[in-house]
């Protein structure tokens, strides 16, 4: 049974958007449909290189990958503001028992990636989603010199703001997308997402 997996992100400089596109490849390779949507910024910013997200996108998805850059160990305010306005989805329980995972990007190796990923999981837990990360069976988790965590895909852009993903970061994002798609399809096939 196929599934529609929403990749929802906010990206200021393009790194998080680059991760979203690699995750979409993995979702497609696993046989699911990837739908990429972005969160608009506060200052009349365009939503990014993908269409802006709506609550209808949340309601229609069978799984969700959520991405945001790190801001002092937390998700960007724009991403937080989006979740703060999803009460109607929460009240209807539209995300309960659907698969989810998170991804992020920071400017330095110790820029708060893991703390951010953990904080990004909180609204997903409140929505009743089933969270997943990346298992250590993925070899890149053992040898990456840049991004990559068991909590979800990450990118380290460095002080120059390099949006080009390393080979390990790309592979981990694709593997994450495959795993998320497989879990989404399994939950949907079992009818678990309807309980």
Image: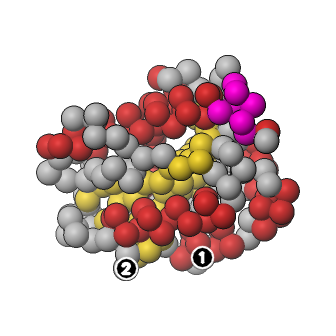
In percent of the image, x 41 and y 68: which residue is there? 116
Horizontal side of residue 150 vs 96, given as left or right? left
Query: Which residue has dot 2 on it?
Result: 72
Residue 170, percent across and down?
A: 31, 39
Query: From where the camera sits, is residue 193 visible?
Result: yes
**What residue sits 48% from the left and 54% below the top?**
102
The label nearer to you, 1 versus 2, is 2
Residue carrying label 1: 42
Image side of residue 54 versus residue 146, left or right? right
Residue 30, x across and y down, in percent: 50, 23
Magenta stretch, overall SS: helix
Q: Is residue 192 magenta?
A: yes
Residue at 38% of width from left, 75% of height from top? 73
Distance, label 1 to label 2, CA atoms, is 18 Å
For label 2, the SS is loop
- Residue 176: image quadrant is top left
Give coordinates of residue 32: x percent, y percent. Answer: 59, 26
Q: For the C terminus, give its image quadrant.
A: top right
Specify the segment rendered in magenta.
187-193
Residue 22 shows up from this direction: no
Query: Dot 2, crowdedness within 10 Å: few (<14), some or many (≥20)?
Result: few
Among numbered discs 1 and 2, the one appearing first in the sequence: 1
- Inspect the magenta stretch and tell me whether residue 81 lies in it: no
Task: Tell me the SS state at disc 1.
Answer: loop
């Amino acid at each position: 049974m196929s599934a529609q997996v929403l990749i929802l992100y906010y990206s200021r400089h393009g790194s998080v958007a680059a991760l979203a596109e690699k995750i979409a490849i993995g979702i497609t390779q696993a046989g699911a449909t990837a739908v990429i949507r972005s969160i608009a910024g506060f200052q009349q910013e365009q939503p990014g290189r993908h269409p802006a997200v709506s609550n209808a996108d949340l309601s229609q998805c069978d799984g969700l990958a959520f991405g945001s850059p790190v801001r002092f160990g937390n998700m960007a305010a724009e991403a937080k503001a989006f979740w703060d306005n999803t009460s109607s989805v929460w009240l209807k329980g539209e995300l309960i028992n659907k698969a989810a995972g998170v991804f992020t990007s920071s400017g330095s190796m110790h820029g708060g990636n893991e703390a951010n990923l953990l904080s990004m999981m909180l609204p997903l837990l409140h929505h009743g989603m089933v969270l997943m990360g990346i298992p250590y069976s993925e070899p890149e988790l053992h040898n990456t010199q840049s991004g990559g965590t068991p909590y979800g895909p990450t990118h380290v852009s460095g002080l120059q703001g390099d949006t080009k993903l390393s080979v390990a970061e790309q592979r981990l994002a694709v593997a994450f997308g495959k795993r998320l798609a497989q879990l989404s399809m399994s939950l949907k096939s079992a009818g678990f997402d309807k309980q």
